[in-house]
Amino acid sequence: MKKAALLLVALLLAAAGASAQQYKWVDRNGRVQYGDTPPPGANAQRLRTPSGSAAPQSAARSGARSPSDPETEFRKRREAAGKEQEKQAGAEQEAQIKQENCARAQAAARDLQSGQRIVRTDAKGERYFLDDAQVAQEAARARQLVQEWCS
């Protein structure tokens, strides 16, 4: 009998140490709610203070780090590394696009300067040949694109 009573007392003492902060608030519907974490923006009233709350507050005031700080710092470093990786991938993709556009512009300029007849297709799907003035105009545009993409 004494062993059972001692066991019961030990369990009650352990449960008392594990109790959390309790709050009371009124929800949007006007009902009174109780819980250990009130919703954001609620006017919550503390009901009781946990027995072990003095130690963590004094540690926070003295500048001691909590056990979650290394994990938070790791997450921040990992997030920063991820952002840096995305930025680098974006820069590499832009460089590849610029290189492809440069190659296209150089190929178009070579085709226009080759002296061969240049054929285009109109809106109706019919083919037509460019005259010398049109070739000169497109060659100037191709040179401008080469300067823009290849510099």
Image (spheres, grey):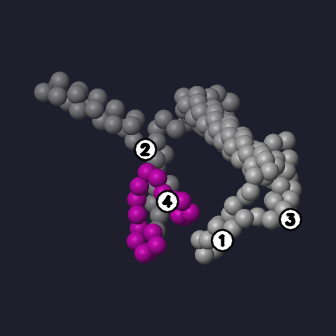
Residue hosting label 3:
133
Quadrant (top left, top right, bottom left, bottom right) of the C terminus: top right
First-in-chain label (2 vs 3):
2
First-in-chain label (2 vs 4):
2
Q: Which mark is residue 39?
A: 4
Nearer to me, 97 or 74: 97
First-in-chain label (1 vs 2):
2
Q: In front: mark 3 or mark 4?
A: 3
Queried whether the magenta region covers residue 97, the answer comes back as no
Residue 142 x %, y %: 81, 53
Q: Residue furthest left?
A: 1
**Figure check: 82 above or below 131:** above
Which amino acid type is shown beneath numbered disc 3?
Ala
Residue 73 x %, y %: 61, 32
Residue count near mark 3 (Cα–Cα under 10 Å), binned few <14, some 14–19, many ≥20: few
Q: Residue furthest top?
A: 3
Residue hosting label 1:
122
Left or right: where does residue 118 sit relative to residue 33? Answer: right
Which amino acid type is shown beneath numbered disc 2?
Ala
Magenta-colored span: 27-45
Nearer to me, 41 or 104: 104
Q: What is the C-alpha distance between the residues marked 1 and 2?
A: 77 Å
Q: Which mark is residue 3?
A: none
First-in-chain label (3 vs 1):
1
Q: Secondary structure at mark 2?
A: loop
First-in-chain label (3 vs 4):
4
Residue hosting label 2:
20
